[in-house]
């Protein structure tokens, strides 16, 4: 899943980026409100972690703009402004959660899991196809109950394909799910990840197949 982190404190941003990547998420880090507004209208995010006190304004002003265009992406506000009135303002503006600084990274991850469970149009906590299962909460894949050990980016490819199982996923959509805006993407990098993932699924007898759609992308489906 791709997450937008809007945070202008370098040390905080670096720590959160590492924690989220360790949780197998793609992180786009933005430090200003203007850049955040541009990013959310260009990219598709699974969640937004939003600081309030940004160099060019209050991060809360981003939320009504998201909601006005029908974007239901979960937003967790992260801020040192933790007074009751501030929390109420954040939630009334449309934030899904409000977490005061300082906070434990473990609590942030737990709150992130919680807000991701709320929307009705998201996949269930565990996605299944053939003998393959993907636990979204624990970020783990398994085949017939046996863990499937996958590097971070192969896991991200698998998640993106499973979220649209039975439908073609374009190369651009897969790249957005796997790489952040700061990553340099080699021309054949995505194909390499897909090839390795395809081989591991076959070796594990997952009863799923990744089909390449020439010039478009990839499709994951059951192979009885």
Image (cartoon, rainbow, N blue to C red):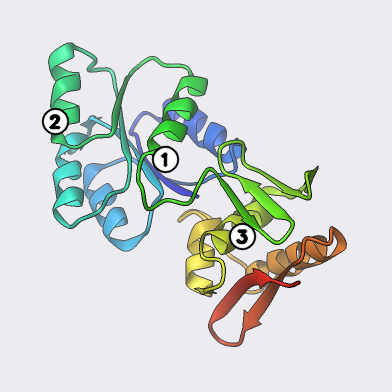
Give left or right: position of 112 versus 94. Answer: right
Whether the residues at callouts 2 and 1 have beta carbons within 8 Å, the answer is no
x, y percent for residue 104: 47, 17
The residue under label 2 is: 92
The residue under label 1 is: 116
First in sequence: mark 2 or mark 3? 2
Which residue appears at 78% of the width and 62% of the height? 201
First in sequence: mark 2 or mark 1? 2
Q: Given this view, does label 1 or label 3 mark the residue nearer the observer? A: 1
| Residue 157: mark in rendering | 3
Give left or right: position of 209 versus 42. Answer: right
x, y percent for residue 62: 19, 44
Q: Residues within 10 Å of mark 1 (few under 14, many from 20)?
A: many
- Pick the quarter of the image with the C terminus: bottom right
Give left or right: position of 163 versus 191. Answer: left
In whole angstroms, how far apart are the C-alphas of marks 1 and 3?
A: 19 Å
Which residue appears at 53% of the width and 82% of the height? 216
């Amino acid at each position: 899943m791709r997450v937008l982190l809007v945070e202008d404190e370098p040390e905080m941003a670096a720590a959160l980026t590492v924690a989220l990547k360790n949780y197998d998420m793609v992180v786009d880090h933005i430090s200003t409100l203007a850049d955040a507004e541009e990013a959310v209208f260009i990219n598709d995010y699974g969640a937004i972690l939003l600081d309030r006190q940004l160099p060019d304004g209050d991060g809360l002003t981003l939320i009504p703009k998201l909601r006005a265009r029908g974007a239901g992406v979960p937003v967790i506000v992260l801020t040192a402004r933790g007074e009751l009135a501030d929390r109420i303002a954040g939630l009334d503006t449309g934030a899904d959660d409000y977490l005061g600084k300082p906070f434990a990274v473990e609590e942030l991850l737990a709150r992130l899991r919680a807000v991701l469970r709320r929307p009705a149009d998201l996949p269930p906590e565990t996605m299944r196809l053939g003998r393959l299962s993907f636990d979204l909460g624990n970020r783990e894949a398994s085949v017939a109950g046996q863990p499937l050990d996958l590097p971070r980016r192969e896991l991200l490819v698998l998640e993106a394909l499973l979220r649209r199982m039975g439908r073609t996923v374009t190369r651009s959509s897969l790249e957005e799910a796997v790489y952040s805006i700061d990553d340099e993407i080699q021309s054949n990098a995505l194909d390499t990840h897909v090839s390795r993932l395809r081989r591991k699924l076959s070796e594990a007898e997952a009863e799923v197949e990744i089909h390449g759609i020439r010039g478009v992308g990839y499709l994951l489906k059951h192979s009885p």
